[in-house]
Image (spheres, grey):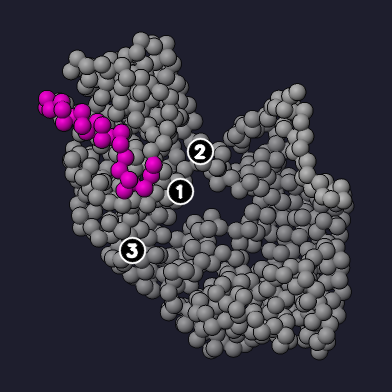
Amino acid sequence: MNIEDVTVSLSSRDGKKLVEYTTYKRGQKQPIEPRKPVLRPSEINNIEELYINGLHLEQYKQHNYDAKDYYIEGLNRDPGDVRCNTALARLCLKNGEFEKCVGYSDAAIKRLTLRNQHPVDTEAMYLKGLALKYLGKYDEAYDVLFKAGWNYAHRGAAYYELANIDCMNGKFADALEKLDVSAGLHEGHTKALNLKAAIFRKLGCAEKAREAARTAGLVDPLDMFSRVELARLGDDKEIIETYGGKPENFIDVACDYIGAGFYDDALFALGLTGVDYPLFDYYRALCHDKMGQADKAAEYCKKADSQDTGYCFPSRLEDMAALECGIALYPAGANAYYYLGCLYYDKFRYDAAMSCWEKAIERNGGHAKALRNLALAYFDKKGDFISAKTRMEKALESDTTEPRLLFEYQHLLKNMNIAPEKRLAVYDKHENLMLMRDDSYLDYLTLKSMTADYSTAIELAKTRRFHIYEGGEGKLTRQHAWMHVLYGNELAGKGDLGKAAEIYKDGINMPKSYGEAKTFFNQEAHVYYFTGLLLEKQGLDSMGAFAEAAVYKAAVSELSMFRALALRKLGRFAEAGAVLEEMMRAGDNLIENRDRRTYYGVGSPSPLPFENDIVKNNLVEGYVLKAYASLGLGKFGNAEDHIKKAGDLNPHDFRIYAFHCIKDRIDV
């Protein structure tokens, strides 16, 4: 009997089957077809595929490829294409570029209505209606949203927005009719139910208001809008206990009220918690301004500007209006500009963000966060390294307690090709900040190694308890191995073979204080390879060390060269050649596709600050691989050419330093 033929089940006393298991028989499924990365927009043959690829990137929130590039390429080929214009309108709406959204929507609508004023697809009309509503052009928005409601797919959403505009105009009966349509089309539409509750309350129909709010609460027990409505009616006394520590929840409800013009209700929602939070006051200012109470609104803007910026992260499109109100009513304040700049930057509106941060600094020259953000923007978006450096230095001067500023300043210096000795001097000047971050401390160890102070780097590493973070695994252990290899090589070169052997051995053993256990995937081929050379020099058995160095551990890297050299020592020349050829191919691929980022998001490393130049990164990586591979092949001239090309781009890359340290010590 085969185990695949056995089924085990458990039944209740009355014969009802509770659970059953049959061993899965492998080999029955069709093999999964590998999904390939998207092509460049210019490589795609037709507009439909450009749209489909862009939509895929948009839906999966691909962070290394921009859906907009595919839609724009489609419009370059056909400026009136409905799909690409609608997609760009959608992206512009998400980014708060409302005028642009209207423009793209109009282009799509023009093509859609060539033959029929009521097209099947009305998404472009719906998007235009929303954009016009955000722009405060309510009459225009009303007409367009009605047209969007012609199509079933957008009717419910369009009618909800129409009901909001009716509420603004005091047409509550019309609003209730539209909300009935909207809620009828979408079961569980809590926003529609809650808006009905608010309207009934304003009409004096308290019981109907309670019924609508309670229905919304039954649909979604975590729905806060319904809880606020019940609190407005005096029925919900526990709302603060449930939501009191999360101010963003109250702002979400306030935004729903503001969308209907119910500013007094928005103020009630914001007043349910005693938490001080800058956005609370900016929204209070917006509501009072809308109610014609400009003086009171200005007071709230001033109060918001005085609060700590540490935990305030604007993210909604509605936040833009609140912050713009803050700027208009209290122009002397810096923080509204700072917050709005952060929101614009998040929405890919880099020039607008930089303008806001510059204005924040005009009002507060020591605004460290705005200065820091400007440094990143100048470097990454403008290529202005000097302005970036000036801003980051001012940020570090303005806030001497924030270790992140030192960490990022060091990465800026690194990517400006500042020498290790000068960077070490910066760490020594700000030693207290350097000691507060593991990544800064590791960078300090790396710089110590690059100035050939290996023993100090090794001792400093031993004295610290590290806390490894997700995404940082392997960085410390990799540097640990290199420090010991280079120090061991130095000692061996001086004839101190016994001490060199100890250092190589320590390079394989990780201190517990590292907080990272040694795994099979630790790349230690160079440690074992040089251990093997040392044993060989002493006339001892070296094959065990070379055998360890020859084990495949991880994806191709510069350390693969040592694996290839060890394979040669074991007489496995074909395998050695294959490893070096793989390194050459990987390097060539990086150089040829220098403009391409990794496609699949899971497991892809996030670039460090000031390291977004993908062309530079890929070229350095490619030339380093080819340099080490050429060295392993004995093509010393080629190796020097490749490492020089890498060094021209990034002269202080640790792998380049290591190359020059080991190139004359390997046995080729």
Disc number placed over residue 435 in the picture, else none = none
Q: Nearer the viewer, mark 2 or mark 3?
A: 3
In the displayed structure image, the side of residue 214 where residue 379 appears, left or right: left
Query: Looking at the rendering, in which quadrant would you find the N terminus?
Result: top right
Q: Position of residue 383 (x, y in %)?
A: 39, 48
Which residue range is magenta in the image?
Answer: 494-517
Q: Main secondary structure of the magenta part?
A: helix
- Residue 148 lies in magenta, yes or no? no
In the picture as drawn, the residue positioned furthest to the front comes out as: 13
Which residue type carries mark 2?
Answer: Arg
Q: Which badge, 1 or 2, comes first in the chain's sequence? A: 1
Q: Position of residue 91 (x, y in %)?
A: 64, 54
Q: Nearer the viewer, residue 603 or 346?
A: 603
Can residue 453 be seen at all in this image of the molecule?
A: yes
140 relative to 378, above or below = below
User: How many residues crowd around disc 1 within 10 Å: few (fewer than 14), some, or many (20 or more)?
Assistant: few
Which three-letter amino acid code belongs to the residue tagged 1? Glu
> Residue 186 location in percent, x, y?
82, 62
- Measure how far apart labels 1 and 2 are at the Cα level: 21 Å
Measuring from the top left, give residue 240's x and y in whole percent: 60, 80
Q: Which residue is mark 2?
A: 597
Return the mark for residue 470: 1
Give the answer, above or below, for where 477 lies relative to 174.
above
Q: Which residue is mark 3?
A: 402
Name the residue rendered at 51%, 76% in the picture.
Answer: 277
Q: Residues within 10 Å of mark 3 (few under 14, many from 20)?
A: some
